[in-house]
Image (cartoon, grey):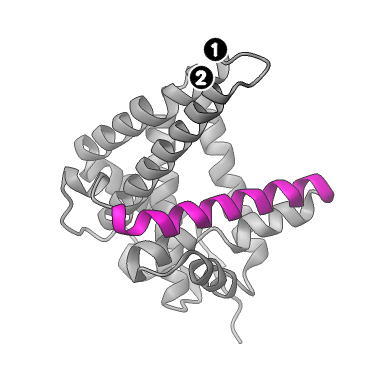
Amino acid sequence: MKQRSIDLVELFKFCYQQYKRYASFVIGAMATLYVLAFIPQVYFVLRAPKTPTQKTEIIRVILTVIQLFLMLGFTKVMFLLVQDAYVEVVDMFNNFRLFLSFFVASILYNIAIILGLFLLIVPGIFIAIRFQFYPYFIIEENDSSFTALQKSYYLSQNLTLELFLFGLTVVVLNIVGVLLMGIGIIFTYPLTTMATAVVYKGLIAEANTIPTDTFRV
């Protein structure tokens, strides 16, 4: 069997092209996510009392639900844009049917990562790598949370090292975006979300080299 690989240069070159092509829409979607999801979470964390109360816990849950709902919509929009599919603003918000599966899968995914990092670090990284594509199975195939996580695990087999390097690149880019006064994330987060979608499509196509010809400049 031929060794599969991810060409990071071609991958991010294509995603940069897509970002420029749909810049106004991407920036608008990211600004919506930033203002309605990220900023309220940061503000709450900074202002929340040291001793949690019932009220603060309720607010925390509400903010988490809002953030996950908007992240689902944003992921869907970026997934459509890398394929040059028709996208409307409403696509950020019309995902109620998918949200329960996404919400449960996201909670399970993040709990598993935290437990893995707490135990030996490496298991947490492994979990993050192997199960990361669950949103796309929910968006594209309307799978349940458990099915989406299971499919992601099998989809990413035999490519763990390549996906680790890809994930490391994603993390570094977004850290740089945050360090640039938090504004750089408006560029880096859409770019890395698009890149993850392209990797998913390459894995689905069982391509030996990712991105496939469809997703190259």
Q: Is residue 60 above or below residue 15?
A: above
Instruction: Identify the residue at image location x=59%, y=83%.
Output: 2
The reply to whether dot 2 and dot 1 touch (C-beta < 8 Å) is yes
Q: Position of residue 157 (x, y in %)?
A: 62, 73
**How many residues crowd around disc 2 within 10 Å: few (fewer than 14), some, or many (20 or more)?**
some
Is 165 or 90 nearer to us in this picture?
Answer: 90
Q: Residue furthest front?
A: 54
Is 166 or 140 nearer to us in this picture?
Answer: 140
Q: Main secondary structure of the magenta part?
A: helix
Q: Is residue 108 magenta?
A: yes
Q: Position of residue 87 (x, y in %)?
A: 18, 52
- The alpha-carbon separation of the residues under discs 2 and 1 comes to 5 Å
Q: Is residue 98 magenta?
A: yes
Q: Quadrant of residue 10?
A: bottom left
The residue wearing badge 2 is 44
Secondary element at tag 2? helix
The residue wearing badge 1 is 47
Secondary element at tag 1? helix
Q: How many marks?
A: 2
Q: Is residue 158 visible?
A: yes
Residue range corresponding to the magenta coloring = 96-120
